[in-house]
Structures are given as C-alpha cells and as structure tokens.
Image (cartoon, rainbow, N blue to C red):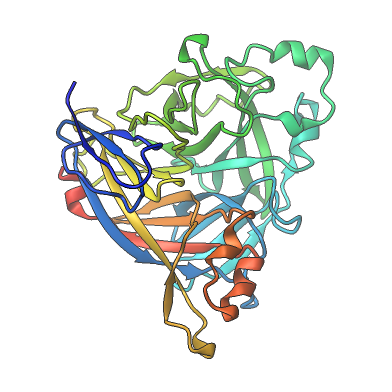
Amino acid sequence: MTFIKKCSANPALFIKINAIILVTLGLTACVSYEKTHSTVFNTSVTGNWITESDGSMMLDPQPSGLKYSNGYLFSISDGSANSSQIKKLHKISIEDFNVIHKYGPLKLAANIMQSCFVSYLTTRPDFEGLAVIPNEPNTWLLVTEDTTRSGSISPECQSQFAKTGSTTYPSLLVRIELVNNELMLTGVRALQFEDAHSVGNFPNDGIEGLAFTRDGRILLGLEKDMERQARVFELKYTKDMFNAIDTFLALTDSQLQVPKFIQGNHPINGMDVYYPNAESAGYLIAAARNDNQLWIMDLAKRRSTTIVNIEFSAPSDMSGGCAPTHKIKNTAIEGVAVHEDTVYLINDPWKKVYKDNALCAEDLFKYEQMAPLLFRLPINPAWVDD
C-alpha cells in the first residue's frame, strides 16, 4: 500500500486517511494519506451565539444533538449540562439563532416506568444524539452513551443486559414525542453490538451520532472501537420497534468508508444525511470534533470519503476595540443538521478549555457561560460531486 507523507514539528501524530490531495490541516504533525481517489477541501465559517428567548446567552446547554424539522432546528443536551437545560428539547430559529421554546422537562410514559433504566432516565440521562423520525410528526429518536450513571439497577436487570458487546451497561435508543405539548418518553430499547465488532468497553466514548436515511435505516456513529477508530453502525427502523421495552436491538456494521488513523483520538460526534438530488443514494456528513473536520461518506460505498477541514470563528464584542471576529482554538462540534443544501453545526463547549477561546475581555463572559455557537455552512457541490 502506498502512502504520501508530509511531516512538520510533531512526528508523534500520524493520520491515515483515504486521500490524494495533501494538506497540512493546520496541525503540527506528520500526516500520512493513503493514495486513493479521495479529496480534501478547506473552508472557514463564522458562527452565531445562540441566545435565550430573553436575549441572554444560552447557559451551559452542552448540546449533543441537532436536527432540522419544519422550519426550525432542535437540539438536545447531554448529562453534563446545567440543570436548567437537561431533559429538554430546544427549538431554535434558523433566522436569528434564538431559542424560541424549550419543551420539557421530559416525562416518562406509564409503560416506561417499568423499565430497568427508569432511574437513569429520570435523573441526568446522557443523551448524545438526536434524529427526527420520518413521517411521524413531533417524534424524535435520542441515543445515550452507556447507562453507567443509572444508579441502582437490579441484579435481574444486570443479568438481562450483560451481553452488550461493549460497555458494562448498554447504550439506549429512546423515542420521544410531543403529546398535548408535553415532551414524553414513549419508548426505550437497549443497543447490542456483536463481539466480532470489537467495540471495546469505553463508557465515555460510545455512540454520539444519530441519523436517518431515506430508506428507513438508523445510522449510529461510535466515537472509537478497540483500535481507537470511529465506526458507523446501523439498524432498520420499524414503527413497532418500541412496542417492546427492555430488550436488545442488534446493530450491524455499516461498512462505510470511515477515515482510519494510526494514532490519537479522532471521534465522530454528530452526523446527518444529505441528498444532493432525488436519485442520489445519499451522503453521511459526520463531524470529527477533535479534528475540526467534516467527513462526507458515500452511502452507496462507491466513492472514497471526502474530508473538509474547517476553520471556525466567532463574533466578537467590539465595544472594547476587538476585531469583528476571532478564531476559535477549541470548537468541539457535536451536533449536525442538514436542511436543503446547508449543513448546520452546533458545538458542545469543552469546559476544561472553552474559556481559552476568549481573546478579548469583553468576550470572556460568553465562554464562562459555556454559551454554544451555531454555524451555517453551505454544502459545496464539489464535496459530493454526485
């Protein structure tokens, strides 16, 4: 196998991705590209601060899912968000990026109260992905990482869900819907990998991406497996799949061309499907948060994956003489939504380093609030060349 290499200051990091065009990605690294028919693009985008309905900065929502539906964007928070944000579905304007409404907090339907995971679902569930269920108005799917935070779980339940194929406790696929304007959790199933998938036991590096295909498949993005590689799994959606609770749903490997890396952590943390035309089999657009990249994977598996490097910027408060925008050192994209020919991206502020993005004192408060940014990026036809 032939590789092209370009090295600079840090030879400790090696990346192996399908590519024919060599770029430095803005990293101080030694980069190895497999010599195939893939392409690499570079672009930049300036985000918008998401505001609450009263105009204030959104307080630490830790968005981990984003999707478009009926003229609006919807986001969900993970389990590390501020208590005022968890178990709520945020409805966001695509015009001014204002939170128009918050549905929730999430309530459990009567049948779910018998679930093995009721303790987990009623405290701080770690929702990490969001998808709109096609042709079922006001219904969504959520996915959790493993349910380690579940608290008490009976020995019977532990035995029932022991064979996850991955973590000690399973990840959950959850159905939520608006019922009389109340946000209800109406379905829950555990997810099961095959041992042959070699997923490994990584409680905080599980499923974070969730998307639907046109032909009714659910795609699920895994942060890393035993070889530290991101993966995409899938299962077929059926309307009756939530008639049962507390049983496994078996996942299969999608066999999509996910970029492979020799070293380091390169997870995918959000994704959605894009169809450039009615005849297209579609493309999965996944956000690689550690790399500030989009990976565009052909669902027909004919084309090699396209890599899009993104330079992110944020608006600055100019009252103290700052420039109109500033580059972001750490973005951490975790939500992806496609609408028509535009991809929307939302970040999940990494609390450890997010404040380091503030270059001017006037902007520090936003970063201290862990206020997220929403980015609107036109999809370049060359990225898919369908």
From the viewer's perspective, is residue 179 above or below residue 282? below
Question: For this view, does 47 lie left or right of residue 308?
Answer: right
Residue 54 point in image, percent of width and height? 65, 77
Residue 167 point in image, percent of width and height? 63, 21
Residue 379 point in image, percent of width and height? 27, 55
Residue drawn 14% across the image and 34% down it: 37
Does residue 307 show up? yes
Residue drawn 74% across the image and 59% down it: 84
Residue drawn 37% across the image and 28% down it: 262
Front-lying residue, 223 or 263: 263
**Residue 143, located in which quarter of the rendered image?**
top right
Does residue 53 show up? no
From the viewer's perspective, is residue 110 above or below residue 310? above
**Residue 345, located in which quarter of the rendered image?**
bottom left
From the viewer's perspective, is residue 204 above or below residue 201? below
Question: For this view, does 350 lie left or right of residue 158?
Answer: left
Residue 209 point in image, percent of width and height? 48, 38
**Total numbered circles:** 0
Question: For this view, does 305 lie left or right of residue 248?
Answer: left
Quarter of the image for the C terminus: give it. top left
Residue drawn 71% across the image and 40% down it: 125
Quarter of the image for the N terminus: give it. top left
Question: For this view, does 149 lie left or right of residue 255?
Answer: right
Residue furthest to the front: 9
Front-lying residue, 28 or 149: 28
